[in-house]
Amino acid sequence: MSPSKGGAPLLKITGMIKEFPGLRALDDVSLDVHSGEIVAVVGHNGSGKSTLVKILAGVYTKDAGEVEFPASAPEEETELHIIHQDLGLAMQLNAIENLGIPKYKKFGESFAPFNTRHEREKALELIGRFGEVFPLNVPVGTLAPAQRSIIGIARALDGWKHPRNILILDEPTEALAANEVAVLFDAVKQLAAEGAGIIFISHRLDEVLELADRIVVLRDGKKVADADREHVDHERLVEFVTGVKTGEAETGRTDRTHGDVVLEIENLSGADVEDIDLTLRAGEVVGVAGVLGSGREALPALVFGSIDAHADKFLLNGKRYTKRNPRASIRRGMGFVPGDRGKFGSVRPMNARENVTLPELKSLTNAAGAVSVGRERQHVMGLVATYDVKPPRTEQTFSQFSGGNQQKIVFAKWLRNRPKVLLLEEPTQGVDIGAKQALYGAIDAAAEAGSGVIVCSSEAKELVRLCDRVLVLRNGRVAAELSGEDLTETRVVLEGYGLGSGADK
Ligand SMILES: Nc1ncnc2c1ncn2[C@@H]1O[C@H](COP(=O)(O)OP(=O)(O)OP(=O)(O)O)[C@@H](O)[C@H]1O
Ligand SMILES: [Mg+2]
């Protein structure tokens, strides 16, 4: 079926080494990718996956090793098309301009964005295949994370001169819901069938097992496995990634007793959301599901006050709260872990310690009002251990942590304040399976300690694991509310598509 797996590989990496101060991020990694082959690269947070991609992209220089394109010929040069973990979009430019960027041939050759009708139609076509079309003429920084993912994907799938190129996807599905993932996978399989070589990086092991022909596992910068798909099952893969022999120790949802109402909202409207009623009790975990554009992505920001919203009634801890904004929300006891951790969740040039303690420096100040760095560091060391942040260096700059470890730091920052209302958006985005369980445990513990928690997630399995109750949004409204025996993965997904009542078994 897949063309010419036998011949020279499209990409050949040999003995790759990359060192950062005090850390060997890649330690003698070799990897071949053939035409028609989908190779998954998996490994825990910080195992070196994105570093490998960045070296191929020329973002980092390698310390040793070879990168060759043995099948490349003058008339058919092997190109790399990459979807980076952080997408690499220009946030102030719009979708059309972002899609056009790779086509700017030379410096000086008209850098003016060309929003011609042709470009617009092309952009609509590229984006339209992933479902709902969103505004193309606004800065992409104002779009939802999932919409930005789609732009990044569309860009990498465009402009191929011939089919035998390498496509690299570094965690492309983290912000996507099941239907968008399915479209992406069809596109990827199609490209492979036409002769492309694919490198697919993901923590979603089910997706890896579904898509890959071959699976390569990195652990602490070393390649520890390179096996054909048929020789690997879920359990083996978990063992490979964690280095521990276990069945997946996934504990189910626990029955919780709920306390007083902490949040009572009537007719919340704003962004894509219309007339939503929401009640949340202390100790309760409420999930929000729905496909892209359903309003799921906007809800936490509307409640937090980072997007303008109208509500007929908004009571926080029984008190009316009208002029909502993030600062006032934090003061009144809300916490928000946004899906877009790079943009809203963190201050990239600061180190991990400063990021963690930012929301509540008061408790760490001394009598004179100065922040006690010693006390702060000690405190953060404890959190770094709890969340298994790697490397456990409180003084490392935030942007130098791997994607998943950045997420753990943002999480630690908001949970340490024991918020009365905790808003979580894609809480385990980019986090490996070990850390995922730790974050689930932390969310359970927050609820147990009395926080009311709202979790928005594109992953139905995650919502079923975490929540007492799930609201499924469709077209900005609550289409279904699921709890007890009705709260299953199938129901969450079907209700999202409007196939709920009667259609499910
Ligand atoms: N610019 C940098 N300076 C210092 N250390 C870095 C830098 N970039 C990455 N690292 C370190 O290199 C290691 C590998 O990081 P990398 O981003 O490749 O991990 P990853 O496998 O992609 O993880 P994740 O699944 O969390 O995205 C990490 O320990 C990370 O902290
Ligand atoms: Mg990464």
Image (tube, helix red, strand yellow):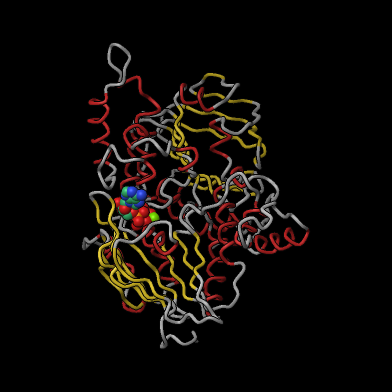
In x, y percent, where is residue 136? 69, 51
* Horizontal relation, residue 385 to residue 361: left or right: left
- Looking at the image, the residue that sits furthest to the right is 117
In x, y percent, where is residue 55? 39, 61
Q: Quadrant of ligand 2?
A: bottom left
Using the rendered image of the protein, determine whether residue 489 is visible from the camera's viewpoint: no
Closer to the camera, 415 or 160?
160
Using the rendered image of the protein, determine whether residue 268 is visible from the camera's viewpoint: yes
In x, y percent, where is residue 273? 65, 40
- Looking at the image, the residue that sits furthest to the top is 368
Image quarter of residue 500: bottom right
- Looking at the image, the residue that sits furthest to the front is 108
Image quarter of residue 324: top right
User: Which residue is at 30% across, 18% downward?
Assistant: 365
User: Which residue is at 56% across, 71% downward?
Assistant: 186
* Horizontal relation, residue 45 to residue 313: left or right: left
Judge whether 439 appears above or below 4 on screen: above
